């Protein structure tokens, strides 16, 4: 796997990203917010991902199948050893086809994919940080997207599963859904992607949560030692 910014300084932890287009948008703001205490990186392919945000392409993992696959590919490289891995998936998984009555990824498989991804990172010695899927507006989304639905009730259901699996697997869980919902409207630039001020707020919030968790982890390690 070809990556960028793989090595961090001895003083700073390395924080890596795997996720969907929502994370692609907030990642530059996150990276800027943590630059005084952490290095950041992501797989190559940002430019290609930005060309079509609704597709799994470039470094957009899309659904949890793509997330699991991207992490497996990264772990084939023995040099891939970030301290923290920020990961998310869900908004592609919940795509609902009214004709078949099926989601793109069933919730049971979603659970399995998240568990496998987090455990594989744990085995490598990486601290996983799971980020919950962001909210949407059913009617607003439907006015843009035809052929499939995204429903807030599915966001909540899949987020509940993700929190259970990630938390029990030793990952930090960041409630980006609740934080985003607390921000004043307007939110959206299209069917579900956010305006730049929202992305900036998301990145800054995630940076605070990750820093707090990392400092608590370091403190507990010192006590244990």
Image: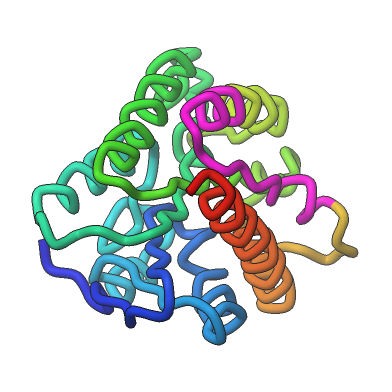
Which residue is found at the position 60% from the left and 35% from the top? 150
Magenta part of the protein: which range? 162-181
> Magenta segment: does it hold 16?
no
Side of 194 where 59 appears, left or right: left
Residue 18, quarter of the rendered image: bottom left
Outermost residue, front side: 225
* Front in this rendered view, residue 46 or 102: 46
Side of 131 where 49 appears, left or right: left
> From this viewpoint, is residue 211 visible?
yes
> From this viewpoint, is residue 191 visible?
no
Residue 195 vs 32, above or below: the answer is: above
Which residue is found at the position 90% from the left and 64% from the top? 184
* Place of residue 120 in the rendered image (x, y in percent of width and height, measured from the top left): 27, 36
Residue 48, quarter of the rendered image: bottom left
Which residue is found at the position 41% from the left and 74% from the top? 40
Q: How many marks?
A: 0
* Front in this rendered view, residue 116 or 153: 116
Which residue is found at the position 37% from the left and 20% from the top? 112
Residue 142 vs 208, above or below: the answer is: above
Residue 105, quarter of the rendered image: top left
* Front in this rendered view, residue 70 or 53: 70
* Place of residue 87 in the rendered image (x, y in percent of width and height, measured from the top left): 45, 49
């Amino acid at each position: 796997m070809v990556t960028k910014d793989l090595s961090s300084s001895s003083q700073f932890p390395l924080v890596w990203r795997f996720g969907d287009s929502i994370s692609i948008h907030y990642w530059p703001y996150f990276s800027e917010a943590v630059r005084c205490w952490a290095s950041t990186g992501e797989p190559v392919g940002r430019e290609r991902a930005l060309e079509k945000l609704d597709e799994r392409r470039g470094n957009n993992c899309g659904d949890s199948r793509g997330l699991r696959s991207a992490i497996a590919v990264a772990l084939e490289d023995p040099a891939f050893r970030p301290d923290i891995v920020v990961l998310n998936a869900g908004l592609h998984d919940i795509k609902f086809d009214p004709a078949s009555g099926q989601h793109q990824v069933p919730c049971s498989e979603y659970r399995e994919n998240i568990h496998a991804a987090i455990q594989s990172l744990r085995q490598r010695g990486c601290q996983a940080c799971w980020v919950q899927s962001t909210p949407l507006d059913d009617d607003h989304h439907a006015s843009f997207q035809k052929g499939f639905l995204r429903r807030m009730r599915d966001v909540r259901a899949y987020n509940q599963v993700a929190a259970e699996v990630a938390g029990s697997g030793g990952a930090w869980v960041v409630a980006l859904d609740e934080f985003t919902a607390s921000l004043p409207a307007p939110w959206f630039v299209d069917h579900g992607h956010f305006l730049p001020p929202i992305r900036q707020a998301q990145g800054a919030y995630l940076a605070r949560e990750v820093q707090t968790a990392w400092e608590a982890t370091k403190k507990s390690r010192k006590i244990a030692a």
